[in-house]
Image (cartoon, grey):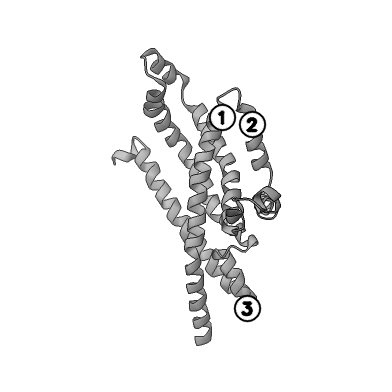
Amino acid sequence: MSGDLAFLADTTLAIARAVPVTVGLFAASAVGATLLGGLLVMAQTRRGTRECARLWIFVFRGTPLLLQIFMVYYGLAALGPIRHGPLWAAFREPLFCAFVAMTCCCSAYIAEVCRAALAAIPAGQIEAALASGMGRWTRLRLIVLPQLVRLALPAYGNELVMMIKSTALASTITVMDVTGVAGQVIAHSYRTLDVFCLAAAVYLGLTGALTAALRYVERRLNPVEGTR
């Protein structure tokens, strides 16, 4: 019994040390995907870039994230201009490759979430702003963005939760995140169920904390509940 407790304690500590890697990958990918998703939404509103944005969204929504990670890590890194150029210092790092793949993939989903939210804003409000002489940036700041954030937040939050779980795929290219460390411990101890249960508990804690934060923000943005 004491041996089991010692093993669980050591494993918990080892997995806990990998939490910053998982959180860092998620945070960087979330920021990158959000910024890129915003650019894709803007590109879809312009005639010259609309088809390129739609092609990007189609490709990254239509192929598995795991395949995209492999293509970045094993494919792009093998190209001559990257392998023998200044970008090699970044692309030789598995963590950076996972960040690139997750950013590109999740930006396509976030772009569709924002596009749907943008389409849900009543056109009459935009027309009223135009009639009152509001400039483009004033309309964006006072009318479009506040409603866009409130309408997109539930689906956007769901995408963020999916991103936390998707970080586990980075372990397939030797990133020592929570899943990667769990796999390493299993390879030495052969105690699959115990270790994966501990890893699952960590992911539950991360997603639970994120969900609670998103619900708090959603309540604050709700004009009715935010006053309670």
* Comes first in the chain, label 1 or label 3: 1
> What SS does tag 2 mark?
helix
Relative to residue 141, is residue 31 drawn left or right? Answer: right
Determine whether 37 is above or below 211 in the image: above
Q: Quadrant of residue 126?
A: top left
On the image, numbered disc 2 is attached to which residue? 52
Q: Quadrant of residue 57?
A: top right
> What SS does tag 3 mark?
helix
On the image, numbered disc 1 is attached to which residue? 43
Q: Nearer the viewer, residue 159 or 134?
A: 134
Determine whether 95 is above or below 136 in the image: below
Q: Please say whether residue 145 is visible from this viewpoint.
A: yes
Q: Nearer the viewer, residue 23 or 9?
A: 23
Q: Quadrant of residue 217?
A: top left
For the point 42% across and 28% down, the residue is 144
Q: Position of residue 46 (x, y in %)?
A: 56, 24
